Image (cartoon, rainbow, N blue to C red):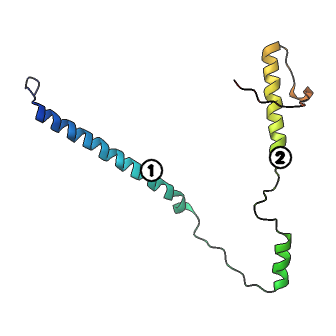
Amino acid sequence: MAGEEITIPVALMHTGVSMGTVFIVLILISFVIYLLRFVPRLFEKKDKPVKEKKKDNADVSAVQKVSPAKGVAPAKKTADTELVAVIAAAIAATMTEETGVPVSPEGLVIRSIKKRSL
């Protein structure tokens, strides 16, 4: 093999077989990735909630009156306070790096936040 001459048809055959193998493996990998979307369903609990019989229409109407409107998301106040804490900590760290003097986030008052482009 080391000293043999290879003709063009034999080289093209080797190339075709090699490229065919690569594409078949790529198609198999994409199929396996497609099947991964069904994996979480295998681990879900099989228990279905038991449906209760409606006892009275008055109870159902009371629940419908109290339930929030569709499409309205409840406000998350904890996320806002966490965001303010993270921004204050980032500003304090930046000021400490720039000035060399340790700055505490508790002493900062943030009046406005402006987005700047880099």
Looking at the rendered structure, the kind of residue marked 2 is Thr
Q: Position of residue 59 (x, y in %)?
A: 84, 81
Label 2, secondary structure: give it: helix
Query: Is residue 3 shown left or right of residue 29?
Result: left
Q: Position of residue 61 (x, y in %)?
A: 83, 79
Outermost top residue: 100
Q: Which residue is mark 2?
A: 78
Marks 1 and 2, how far apart at CA:
37 Å
Residue 33 is tagged as 1
Q: Closer to the N terminus: mark 1 or mark 2? A: 1
Outermost front residue: 117
Name the residue nearer the viewer: 44 or 15.
15
Residue at 81% across, 25% down: 91
Outermost bottom residue: 55
Q: Tag 2: Cα neighbours inside 10 Å, few (<14), some, or many (≥20)? A: few
Relative to 23, is 50 above or below? below
Outermost left residue: 4
Residue at 57% across, 63% down: 44
Residue at 89% across, 30% down: 110
Query: Is residue 30 shown left or right of residue 4?
Result: right
Name which quarter of the figure residue 1 lies in.
Answer: top left
Q: Position of residue 56 (x, y in %)?
A: 81, 86
Label 1, secondary structure: give it: helix
Residue 3 is tagged as none
Q: Position of residue 13 (x, y in %)?
A: 16, 38
Check the picture and name the quadrant holding the C terminus: top right
Looking at the rendered structure, the kind of residue marked 1 is Ile
Name which quarter of the figure residue 69 lies in.
Answer: bottom right
Relative to 20, is 47 above or below? below
